[in-house]
Every structure is written in C-alpha cells, then in structure tokens.
Image (spheres, rainbow, N blue to C red):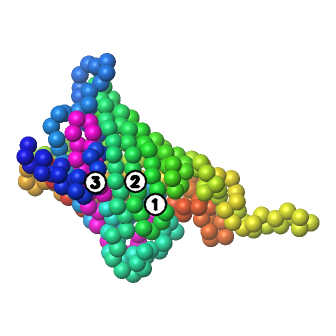
C-alpha cells in the first residue's frame, strides 16, 4: 500500500491531476442494479512502446524514424488518471503533421486522460476526457464514452467527441482476444482489430474540391476546402503480438499492426491534395516492442 501511495504521489506531481484510468475488469456474476465501481485497491502501470512510426485513426504522424511512447497510469475504485507521451527521434513532415523540429528529435505530444468506469456483470461503461497536447498540429480536447463486453473477442464500442480544435465525432469498434501459449507460463498470443467512422462536425471538416469553372465563367469551384463535410468509414487496424512475462508484474510484447483505409473517401486525393482536411488514410505497417510494469 505504501508503494501505491508513492506511485500516486508521483502521478500527482507529473500531471497535476487526480483521476484517470483503465477500465475495470467486468465481473462474471449476476448484474447488480447499480453496478460496481471496480476493486478498492490502487493499481498503477508504467509502460513504454518503441515503434517504427506513429499512426492513430489512420493518420500518420511520423515517418523514417523511431518513436518512443512512455505512459503512466493510475486507477482506484473505477477512477483513474494517465499521462502519455510521444518522442519522435527524427521529425519529418507527413500529410497530417508539420514538424516542430525538422530532422531532429522532439518530445512533440503529451496527452492527459481522465475517466470513470462502472461495471454490471459482463458489461462495463467508461466515460472520460482527453487533452491532446500536440506540437505538430493544433491542440484539442475530447469527451468519450465506451461500452465493453467481457466475452470472447471483448468487443468495445467507443464514441469520441472533439469539442475544441477539430469539432466532430469519431466512432471506433475494437475486438481482441488472447490465446495461451504453452511454451512459457502466462505467455499469450494477442490478436486484435478495430474499425473507425469519422463524422466531421464543423467547417474545419469541409472536403477539398477540384478547381473548375462553368462554361459561362459565372460559377467556379475554388480548388480548396469548400466541399461537403467529411463523413466516411475511415480507418481499420489489424494487430498481432506476443505477451511474454519476464518477472512478476513486468511483461514485454513484440507487436505488429497494419493500418488501412476503410473507404475510397478515406484514401481519396484531389489534384494530389488530401480530400480529408486532416490528411488521407494510407496503408501502414507498424511494428515494435511494448514493455509494461504493473504495480
């Protein structure tokens, strides 16, 4: 318990916040009327990912470099708080980002998350807030709500609502399952997939129109982001990894992921300019290593 208190103190210093977290595991029992808030013991996780590129929601934010992504998470009785960062070892411009330090290493993102989870038997519901402290694009904020079932494939449907820099709504359905690997005790083969839909909600999301004029020259399309708002089946992700226990509480996970567009509008370019104002969605292989220590 003293260790948990020290961890909590460190998080408070780092984030100046009290609460964020990880969804509580659904309990396999009769569904209580009011639900449960999770175990009353404090838990904490330190993690770091080493990846060949940074891709989120189909948008690529690094290329030709390695990214280092540290994270610190605390959870207590359904509440939690986390801080996550991205270090790009060689910042390069992409269709979705403008580098802060071109050609140099940069700590270019710090995200802070707050949430609360309530569980009813095999179903859990999480509501939360995320601040995206990005330096390669405009900073923004989101609220989100996630419903999860603790059954095979562990489906999770999450709705994110951006109310700041990029007003709009993003829907994501994620599936995952881990299979025991008998070679090593507690080793698992981890498979997952996710699928997203983007619903642009402000003028920021207007799509790119090709320059064109009517024969009488009285009506022209500007050749800019003046079209209809972007709304499309957006991105998909397939994942495979192997979780390997090293010592108690510490695991490593070699991982590979494939990100791809879900529709023609997601990958569309007009005059070699992205139809989507945040950048087109391409195909990307992401690979690397996750390391996690649970207190």
Within 10 angstroms of label 3, few (less than 14), some, or many (20 or more) residues?
few
User: Mark 1 touching mark 3, by CB under 8 A?
Assistant: no
- Farthest-out residue, right: 216
Check disc 3 and report the residue beneath it: 16
- Gap in Å between the C-alphas at discs 1 and 3? 19 Å
Q: Residue at x 32, y 38 (%)?
A: 116
Tell me the SS state at disc 3.
loop
Q: Is residue 290 visible?
A: no
Q: Which residues are magenta?
A: 60-84
Tell me the SS state at disc 2.
strand
Question: Can you give x and y, in whole percent of width and height, for residue 234 in the image?
Answer: 52, 52
Mark nearer the N terminus (1 vs 3):
3
Tell me the SS state at disc 1.
loop
| Image vertical order of residue 50 relative to residue 6, above or below | below
Q: Is residue 198 left or right of residue 236?
A: right
User: Mark 2 touching mark 3, by CB under 8 A?
Assistant: no
Check disc 1 and report the residue beneath it: 139
Check disc 2 and report the residue beneath it: 131
Q: Residue at x 54, y 63 (%)?
A: 279
| Magenta span main SS | strand
Q: Is residue 114 visible?
A: yes
| Image vertical order of residue 164 relative to residue 79, above or below | below
Instruction: Report the quarter where the N terminus lies.
Output: top left
- Farthest-out residue, bottom: 103
Question: Can you give x and y, in whole percent of width and height, for residue 26 in the image?
Answer: 26, 31
């Amino acid at each position: 318990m003293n260790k948990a208190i020290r961890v909590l103190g460190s998080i408070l210093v780092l984030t100046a916040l009290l609460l964020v977290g990880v969804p509580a595991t659904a309990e396999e029992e009769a569904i209580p009327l009011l639900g449960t808030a999770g175990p009353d013991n404090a838990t904490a996780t330190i993690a770091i990912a080493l990846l060949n590129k940074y891709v989120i929601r189909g948008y690529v934010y690094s290329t030709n470099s390695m990214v280092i992504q540290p994270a610190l998470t605390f959870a207590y009785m359904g509440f939690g708080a986390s801080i996550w960062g991205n270090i790009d070892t060689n910042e390069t411009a992409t269709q979705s980002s403008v580098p802060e330090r071109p050609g140099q290493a940069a700590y270019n993102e710090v995200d802070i998350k707050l949430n609360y989870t309530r569980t009813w038997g095999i179903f859990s519901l999480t509501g939360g807030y995320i601040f995206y402290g990005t330096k390669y694009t405009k900073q923004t904020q989101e609220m989100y709500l996630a419903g999860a079932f603790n059954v095979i494939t562990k489906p999770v449907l999450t709705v994110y609502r951006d109310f700041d820099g990029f007003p709009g709504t993003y829907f994501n359905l994620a599936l995952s399952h881990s299979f025991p690997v008998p070679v090593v005790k507690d080793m698992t083969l981890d498979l997952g997939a996710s699928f997203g839909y983007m619903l642009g909600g402000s003028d920021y999301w207007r799509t790119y129109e090709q320059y064109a004029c009517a024969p009488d020259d009285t009506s022209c399309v500007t050749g800019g982001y003046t079209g209809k708002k972007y709304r499309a089946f957006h991105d998909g992700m397939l994942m495979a990894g192997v979780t390997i226990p090293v010592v108690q509480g510490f695991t490593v996970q070699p991982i590979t992921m494939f990100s791809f567009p879900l529709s023609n509008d997601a990958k569309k370019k007009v005059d070699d300019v992205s139809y989507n104002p945040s950048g087109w969605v391409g195909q990307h292989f992401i690979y690397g290593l996750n390391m996690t220590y649970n207190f």
